[in-house]
Image (tube, rainbow, N blue to C red):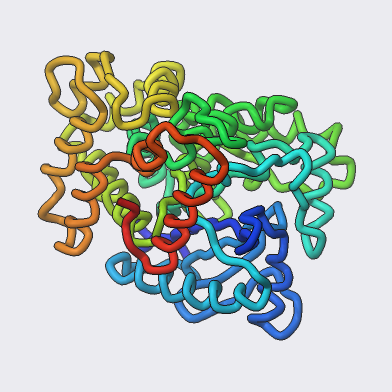
């Protein structure tokens, strides 16, 4: 079934499993799913939410069980499932850990791929790309799926998504540390994401999608080059271009949706849904053409948007945007931090958001990204002991669905 713009949504949240004693990643998602289901399965439907495995055996994905129009209560449904999973994980000496990257993981020695159904696909990915690096095995994100009904709606949605994509990491960055060291990037997940498929660059492109605004052009300019590039590696034809496309927002013509993938997972579902709702209402504003005409949205080249995006990945909400044309979209006359841009967008759409989510969005806009709050909490003490202490506090925030302060 096809839906119209903003009629329904799909939200996906990824979490890592860690050993409660050692704090190391624990590749026991198969055991978790077996405990829940009674036998091993890759997907478990649990009311409003579905659980499933991922590429690596220590990551579980929670997602809306089909498209939903009810965003307002979704954080509650996700939080209930987090509680249930943590209860099951106690039997395995484990718990869920939020944020987009485990701060102490050494992927080369700790990565274990999912070995059950779809394992052939994962093994092929591993052979081509070597999935034992941070870019594959230490990256947890939130995906937002947005429907379009036909080419006209795809054109409007893709134009708006491309334009907003560069400033999303300023809201969501939650991966400032790899292997016990501050990387210099507030969004280290997206920094490694840009190059994790360097062997076949056609797959991720420049992360910001190309200027394509209908199905035919998308197949010709994005899917066909991907299929051609993968063919020598995929001799058994087991990979699908919809899954191979790894841009920061991908078109899923198999279900008429655009999936946004540049958003780091937060400390709790309350924070994830606040960010999702802010993004969705901002996209509605762009699609309405109140800020900028569709024709002008389509003129933005991915190279210009990528420059802005790269600054966000490094500096998050503190990035200063000097691109006058981009600032002009949001009616800002001179250079400004992206935090100021988001505050201006928020003031414009605030009345469309429920009070509960207003409060949560305002917390993030006032206190900064999770990466910023993690670095402040560490207070320049990057010992393993202190990192573990701070991230354990975040695990508590996830368990209780509350903000990290």
Q: Nearer the viewer, residue 364 or 227?
A: 364
Name the residue at 24% across, 42% down. Answer: 367
Residue 265 x %, y %? 46, 50
Residue 18 in which image quadrant: bottom right
- In the figure, 227 relative to 145: above or below? above
Q: How many marks?
A: 0
Relative to 93, is 341 on the left or the right?
left
- Given the current orientation, which residue lies at the most extreme right position? 235
- Is residue 258 visible in the rendered image? The answer is no
- Residue 214 image offset from top left, x and y in percent: 47, 38
* Quarter of the image where one finds residue 128: top right
In-image side of 36 versus 304 (left or right):
right
Residue at 65% in and 78% down: 91
Position of 285 relative to 225 (above/below): below
Vertically, is 9 above or below 143?
A: below
Does residue 381 appear left or right of residue 41 in this picture?
A: left
Query: For the point 29% across and 55% down, which residue is it?
Result: 274
Q: Is residue 151 visible?
A: yes
- Residue 402: where, in percent of width, then height? 33, 62
Q: Position of residue 327 (x, y in %)?
A: 21, 21
Residue drawn where x is 88% and y is 46% of the image: 236
Given residues 352 and 373, the one toward you in this image is: 373
Q: Identify which residue, 404 or 298, lies in the foreground.
A: 404
């Amino acid at each position: 079934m096809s839906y119209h713009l903003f009629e329904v949504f799909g939200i996906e949240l990824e979490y890592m499993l860690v050993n409660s004693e050692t704090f190391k990643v624990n590749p026991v998602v198969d055991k978790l799913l077996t405990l829940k289901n009674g036998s091993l399965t890759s997907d478990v439907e649990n009311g409003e939410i579905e659980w499933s495995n991922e590429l690596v055996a220590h990551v579980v994905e929670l997602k809306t069980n089909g498209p939903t129009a009810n965003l307002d209560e979704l954080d509650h449904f996700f939080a209930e499932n987090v509680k249930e999973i943590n209860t099951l994980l106690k039997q395995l000496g484990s718990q869920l850990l939020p944020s987009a990257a485990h701060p102490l993981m050494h992927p080369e020695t700790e990565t274990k791929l999912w070995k059950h159904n779809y394992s052939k696909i994962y093994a092929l990915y591993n052979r081509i790309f070597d999935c034992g690096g941070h870019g594959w095995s230490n990256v947890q994100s939130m995906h937002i799926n947005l429907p379009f009904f036909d080419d006209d709606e795809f054109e409007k949605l893709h134009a708006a998504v491309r334009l907003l994509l560069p400033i999303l990491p300023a809201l969501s960055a939650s991966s400032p540390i790899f292997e016990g060291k501050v990387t210099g990037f507030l969004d280290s997940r997206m920094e490694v994401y840009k190059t994790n498929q360097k062997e076949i660059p056609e797959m991720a492109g420049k992360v910001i999608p190309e200027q394509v605004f209908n199905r035919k052009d998308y197949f010709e300019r994005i899917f066909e080059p991907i299929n051609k590039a993968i063919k020598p590696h995929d001799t058994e034809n087991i990979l699908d271009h919809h899954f191979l496309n790894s841009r920061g927002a991908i078109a899923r013509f198999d279900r008429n949706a655009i999936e946004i993938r540049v958003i780091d997972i937060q400390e709790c579902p309350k924070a994830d849904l606040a960010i999702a709702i802010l993004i969705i209402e901002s996209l509605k504003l762009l699609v309405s053409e109140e800020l900028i005409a569709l024709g002008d949205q389509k003129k933005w080249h991915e190279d210009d948007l990528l420059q802005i995006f790269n600054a966000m990945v490094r500096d998050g909400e503190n990035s200063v945007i000097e691109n006058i044309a981009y600032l002009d979209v949001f009616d800002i006359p001179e250079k400004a931090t992206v935090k100021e841009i988001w505050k201006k967008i928020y003031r414009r759409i605030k009345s469309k958001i429920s009070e509960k989510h207003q409060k949560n969005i305002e917390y993030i806009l006032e206190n900064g990204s999770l990466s910023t709050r993690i670095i402040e909490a560490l207070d320049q003490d990057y010992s393993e002991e202190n990192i573990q202490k701070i991230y354990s506090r975040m695990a508590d925030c996830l368990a209780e669905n509350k903000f990290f302060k």
